[in-house]
Image: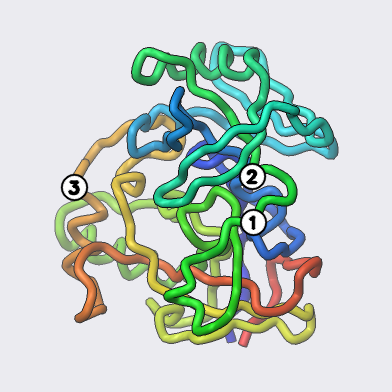
Amino acid sequence: MPTISSLHIYPVKSLQGISLPHATLTTQGLAFDRQWMLVDAAGQFVTQRQLPALARIRTRLTSDSLILEHAGLPPLLIPLEIIPDKRCEVVVWRDTCVACEEDATVSQWLTQAVGHWQGNDLRLVRFAPGFTRPVDPNYLDGDSADTAFSDGYPFLIVSEASLAALNTQLLANGADPVPMERFRPNIVLNGMNAFGENACKTLTAADAGYSFTIRKPCQRCKVTTVDQHTGLIANPKEPLRTLTAMNPYSHLQGAYFGQNATLTTGTGSTIRTGDTLS
């Protein structure tokens, strides 16, 4: 049976992530995952797709603060308990969400870190308490689910064996292997065959009291080409070219890796590395 080998959150969408030994499960994902997002002057979300340099900004969480770090700048502390008063509408893909905008000093820090975007400062917004962003009902089989600022689903699950199989093919194609962080998963599994997650309908940790439902394969984008420490793109074609050639879905076109999932049971439960799933 598969076990959880690592857990990851990305408090600010498209900035560096944090590996954790355990996390609290919420309907929106692992606690604090993608609760913040960068937007432009019009409220449109901005990610590494537009600004690969965002990968150079590190994130940390303490008991009371979100901390952003970038070489050459003092760390930026954002209190967790102080929800900004300034509410605004922001757009992530096709969804309009209510958000709370962090103050101007945060925008100024971001501009020092990565520069202006389209002539203006980037803005940092927090997912508004009480707002619900539904997951696309077309993939929920009558269930309901919600998420924060993820691309569309609260959990992304990938197996170590799948990455090993991809890297074997990349090497065979004369390309460099890539680390798991390129795919920004939340839950990484070991103890299953390569792409075994693609055959799963559910994943349950009976002893820990939670379960997930697998909803749809995750289509990958150019973020997978970005070095998640330097923000550089050494090869703009890989791993997307190899994933497209390996695509196991006859009804889908493109590059796919990992599975999007929602929480079926266990809101408020603790998920831990080492948990066994079935």
Q: Are marks 3 and 2 in contact (CB under 8 Å)?
A: no
Badge 2: residue crowd in 10 Å (few <14, some 14–19, many ≥20):
many
Q: Quick check: 42 left or right of 133?
A: left
Q: Report helix, strand or loop for mark 1.
A: loop
> Does 194 appear above or below 56?
below
Q: Amino acid at mark 2?
A: Gln
> Does 229 appear above or below 19?
above
> Based on the displayed image, in which of its 4 quarters is residue 172 positioned?
bottom left
Residue 132 image label = 1
Label 1 vs 3, first from the N-terminus: 1
Q: Report helix, strand or loop for mark 2.
A: loop
- Front one among 224 and 193: 224
Q: Report helix, strand or loop for mark 3.
A: loop
Label 3 vs 2, first from the N-terminus: 2
Residue 196, percent across and down? 43, 82
Residue 113, percent across and down? 50, 17
Residue 178, percent across and down? 35, 52
Residue 21, percent across and down? 72, 57
How far is the residue under mark 3 from the one under mark 2? Answer: 30 Å
**Residue receiving disc 3:** 237
Label 2 vs 1, first from the N-terminus: 2
Q: Quick check: 92 left or right of 51?
A: right
Q: Amino acid at mark 1?
A: Thr
**Residue receiving disc 2:** 35
Q: Is residue 233 visible?
A: yes
Badge 1: residue crowd in 10 Å (few <14, some 14–19, many ≥20):
some
- Front one among 232 and 266: 266
